[in-house]
Image: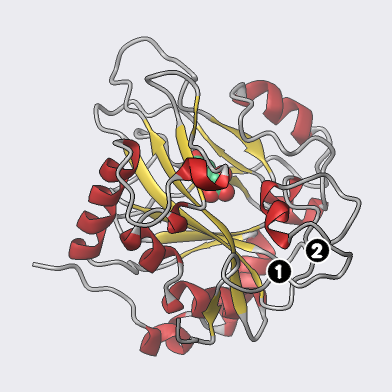
Amino acid sequence: MSNTVMTLADVDRIVTDAVVAEYWERGYWISPPLFDDAEIERLRAAHERLWAGEYDFHTPSQYGIAPVTHGSNALRQQCNAFWLNAAIREAVLSPLLGAIAARLMRVDSVRLWHDQAIYKPGTGEGPTTDAGNVGWHQDYGFWTSASTTNMCTAWVALQDTDLHNGGMRTIVGSHKWGLVEGSDSFFDQDLEALAQKFAAQGGSPWLDEPCILKAGQASFHHALTFHGSGPNRSSEPRLSVVSHLMPGDTTFRAGRPWHPNNTLLGPNAYDGQPYSGDFWPQLWPVVSR
Ligand SMILES: O=C(O)CCC(=O)C(=O)O
């Protein structure tokens, strides 16, 4: 039997003003299930196809978006997976994610900044390895060419996820610290060293909270919220799809550290150029594609 999921009709009832206030106070919010069992199965199969090099549309090499992996039993990351796979495209562009993010960001329209499919290998109970770790980081540390820090990430679990299988952890309230120097540290896997470094710069205690999710649930975090994750001690991979979202009127700020998606602005990219069009599709309000 399929799990009960939240729908667009539920957004106003569930994402209340109190929820929005919680998101802005704590830097993240965990939703009820958004994807049903059939959708989760489709997305799990999409992962399998992606890592096997089977694509529905483009191939990564056509657009310079090759997956990032560090070794055979390591974290795998595919950015802009929505160019490659139909099920992932449907999920990361879902109006439901868009409507929730619009409420949380307190904006009228929402576009995709980019997406990710993330595969964290299960290492079992053997010796601890940090090969699957995601370093403590702030998403905006990578995104300073975007005109606002008011961006929001929806991280969708494709299995029940907790600390045992390397679930994400957030540092409560850390979005209020502003952009912290050197926080583009996703691929630095020494969580302890990073925690020491960033905790010393924070304006409040380092309060590390796990995002415990059932399959189909999503956590929504602010682009300045520190987050990361540790090893997956289960014997199965931890799979997720991630939708990084921005207000519909976000523009390019020239002269900032480069982000790969800025290449898509074309050769004459200019300060103030809107991130719009097919590379940054609108999720909310719904538009026909
Ligand atoms: O998958 C993880 O553990 C971290 C993902 C992440 O950094 C993100 O979604 O912004």
Q: Decide: few, some or many residues near mark 1? Use Cα within 10 Å; few <14, some 14-19, many ≥20.
A: many
Residue that badge 1 annotates: 275
Instruction: Residue 100: give its label.
Output: none
Viewer-proximal residue among 145 and 205: 145
Residue 166 left/right relative to 52: right
Residue 272, located in which quarter of the rendered image? bottom right
Secondary structure of the residue carrying numbered label 1: loop
Does mark 2's beta carbon lie closer than 8 Å to ligand 1?
Answer: no
Q: At x 45% / y 70%, what residue is drawn?
A: 93
N-terminal of the pair, mark 2 or mark 1, is 2
Q: Is residue 224 visible?
A: no
The colour scheme used here is secondary structure
Q: Position of residue 27 (x, y in %)?
A: 64, 59
Q: Position of residue 4 (x, y in %)?
A: 22, 73
Residue 215, located in which quarter of the rendered image? bottom left
Viewer-proximal residue among 115 and 33: 115
Q: At x 47% / y 72%, what residue is drawn?
A: 97
Secondary structure of the residue carrying numbered label 2: loop
Does mark 1's beta carbon lie closer than 8 Å to ligand 1?
Answer: no
For the N terminus, which image quadrant?
A: bottom left
Q: Position of residue 180 (x, y in %)?
A: 82, 43
Q: At x 51% / y 28%, what residue is drawn?
A: 133
Q: Decide: few, some or many residues near mark 2? Use Cα within 10 Å; few <14, some 14-19, many ≥20.
A: many
Q: Amino acid at mark 1?
A: Tyr
Q: Position of residue 208 (x, y in %)?
A: 59, 41
For the C terminus, which image quadrant?
A: bottom left
Residue 19 left/right relative to 264: left
Residue that badge 2 annotates: 252
Q: Is residue 177 visible?
A: yes
